[in-house]
Image (cartoon, rainbow, N blue to C red):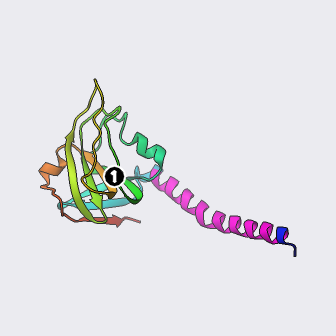
Amino acid sequence: MSKGKKVSSLILILAMVLAVVIVPEVIYYKSHINKSGGLGYVADIGGKRINLEIVTTTQAMAIGLSNRDYLDADKGMLFIYNKRIMPGFWMKDMRFPIDIIWISGDRIVGAQENAPVTTTGPLPVYYPSEPVSLVLEVNAGFVEANDIKAGDRVNFKSLK
């Protein structure tokens, strides 16, 4: 077999394997999102269970909770990063204030409480005090009401 045919065969096999692995996952997640409004994950934090909407793509992260009228009290949006980084969050097109919880692994490293809706002037950008792998947005007041502090543990669970 020539080198070109070997490469073509290898690419075809790789494409078939990826299709078998990735397509079912995409179908599962899309159907699960449509049924539950989330991906079937929860976080237990400060004795409170939060149903999570998971965000992993750059486009979804840029939109976040923007242009929504509210967030249910038992829900939050979890941003998942491939590595620990210093992400900046702003309140562009937000209609309600939120708490932004910075998480590294399963530990809270800090929070921006009551990030306000900003309608005029430059938008402030909020950053964690150290690199994080996860960021959880919840309704404003959650951190204070549940006595959340740096060092607290977050337990993530799948409901699948």
Report the residue marked by disc 1.
86
In the figure, 140 relative to 20: above or below? Answer: above
What quarter of the picture does the C terminus occupy?
bottom left
Question: Residue at coordinates 83% horizontally, 67% vertically from top-left?
Answer: 4
Range covered by the magenta-colored residues: 5-33
User: Residue 117: x percent and y percent?
Assistant: 25, 32
- Category of crowding for the residue at label 1, using alpha-carbon neighbours closer than 10 angstroms: few (below 14), some (14–19), many (at least 20): some
Query: Does the magenta-highlighted stretch encompass residue 6?
Result: yes
Residue in front for this viewpoint, 21 or 148: 148
Q: Does the magenta portion include 115? A: no
The quarter of the picture where residue 148 lies is bottom left
Q: Secondary structure at mark 1?
A: loop
So how many labels did they put on this image? Answer: 1
Residue type at mark 1 is Met
- Residue plotted at (31% across, 57% down): 131
Residue at image position (32%, 60%) is: 42
The quarter of the displayed image where residue 13 is located? bottom right
Q: Is residue 7 above or below residue 30?
A: below
Dividing the picture into quarters, in which one does residue 51 lie? bottom left
- Is residue 24 in view? yes
Pick out the residue farthest to the bottom: 1
Residue 80: x percent and y percent?
39, 56
Q: Residue at x 42, y 46 (%)?
A: 61
**x, y percentage for residue 146?**
14, 54
Q: Is residue 11 shown above or below 27?
A: below
* Location of the N terminus (image quadrant): bottom right
Relative side of 145 to 101, left or right: left
Left or right: where does residue 113 sit relative to residue 58? left
Main SS category, magenta section: helix
Residue 52 in the image: state x and y as whole percent.
34, 54
